[in-house]
Image (spheres, rainbow, N blue to C red):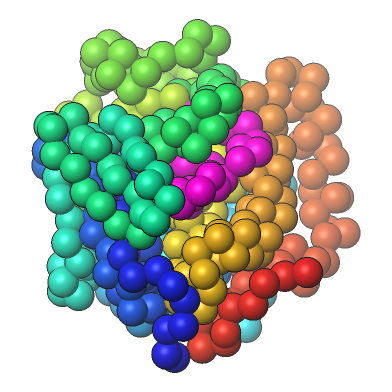
Amino acid sequence: MTRIGTVRTALVIGGGIAGPVAAMALHRAGIEAAVYEAYDSTADGVGGAMTIAPNGQNALDAIGAGAVVRDIGTPVTAMGLRSWTGKHLAQFAPPSRLPALQFVWRADFYRAVYAEAERRSVPIHHGKRLTHATDTGSGVTAHFADGTRADADILIGADGIRSTVRPLIDPLAPQPNYAGLVCFGARMDRSGLPSTNGVMYMCFGKRAFFGYQVFDDPSAMWFVNLPHGLPMTVAEARAIGAEHWMRTLRTACADDRTPALEMISRTDPGRLLITGPMENMPRVPTWTRGRMTLIGDAAHAASSSSGQGASIATESAVELARCLRDLPYDQAFATYEQLRRPRVERIIRLGARTNSNKTAGPVGRVVRDLVMPAAMKLVNPEKTAWQFDHHIDWNTKAAPLT
């Protein structure tokens, strides 16, 4: 589709996943975009496991990039819920008319997105830590800690839950809150367990939440969300050391009648991924000011419990580019937010409810395990399909909402 918007150039701050996807979408919309990343090097090997939902895959397909997931992903046909006693609580999946969720390691997905961005000649600059930005009225200038600067028509903050751009847009913007959980995971080359046949299991343990999937080859993955009263940074958690955390995880899962203890015990401490605290992001009231706006976790950070963080970030990146292709930047920003805010905030609320189940006390565990099986039988899968069955029609012209 021919671009009729007024934006010619864009600065994208943040080189995680949302940033390069946004730049690719902008390029496809005919807008020259470059990514500026604070860290000197790429994030190869960083991060744990994640799933890309059907809606996230659709958003990538809208800009011709769906293969970056399908080439590296492993289908997840269903999510199974179990109690610490081994009791089956529920099983659910997107409607069969939609593609399966894709399991990916974040590091693999990150590399695939970067490779696709490079293939499309998207400039990605490292060692560019944003300090401030100046809206000149006719454009915006980004200033970096190394003394350099960059100019463009607009600036997009894709710099994550601890965004630098967010307080530039709104000095009173909220900061993330600790969710009471510290997260760990591991990739096992040989689990010694039978395949789960595409099902990823989520186990509400007695002292910790445990998730796992055993693949058709000998490999497997597991993760633990461990309740921990005091907040800590990723660096603080890693400084404690893998040996200590492995002992803690074995103790936390010792009473659970799930594969948790067996899988943790078979994992070499050197393979432990310490991904750090789980954080909740309060509602961000202001996404846009002047020629600057936010996407992804900077605007709408969904808990990892939602399974939608990367997917809704990808949706927002693509939707923003479509709006900028068809509208003047101020109308584009307003239309983008009107399109995105109700949906992402509904998904965030779902993730928050899941987090509360993970930290349930003894009485809460009993009530949850009694109520959930009956409640899930009453759920019509089509009523929950809204979060997965979301399509962005790239070829439809964006128009201001009334």
Is 188 drawn above or below residue 357 in the view shown? below
Q: Can residue 194 be seen?
A: no
Tell me if residue 286 is in the magenta stretch. yes
Q: Can residue 63 be seen?
A: yes
Residue 334's quadrant in the figure? bottom right
Is 224 drawn above or below residue 10 in the view shown? above
Tell me if residue 121 is in the magenta stretch. no
Q: How many marks?
A: 0
Residue drawn at point x = 21 percent, y = 35 percent: 144
Residue drawn at point x = 65 percent, y = 38 percent: 285
Left or right: residue 87 versus residue 306 is right
The quarter of the image holding the N terminus is bottom left
- Residue 150 percent location from the top left of the image: 21, 49
The quarter of the image holding the C terminus is bottom right
Is 172 drawn above or below residue 100 in the view shown? above
- Residue 312 percent location from the top left of the image: 53, 58
Q: Which residues are magenta?
A: 278-302
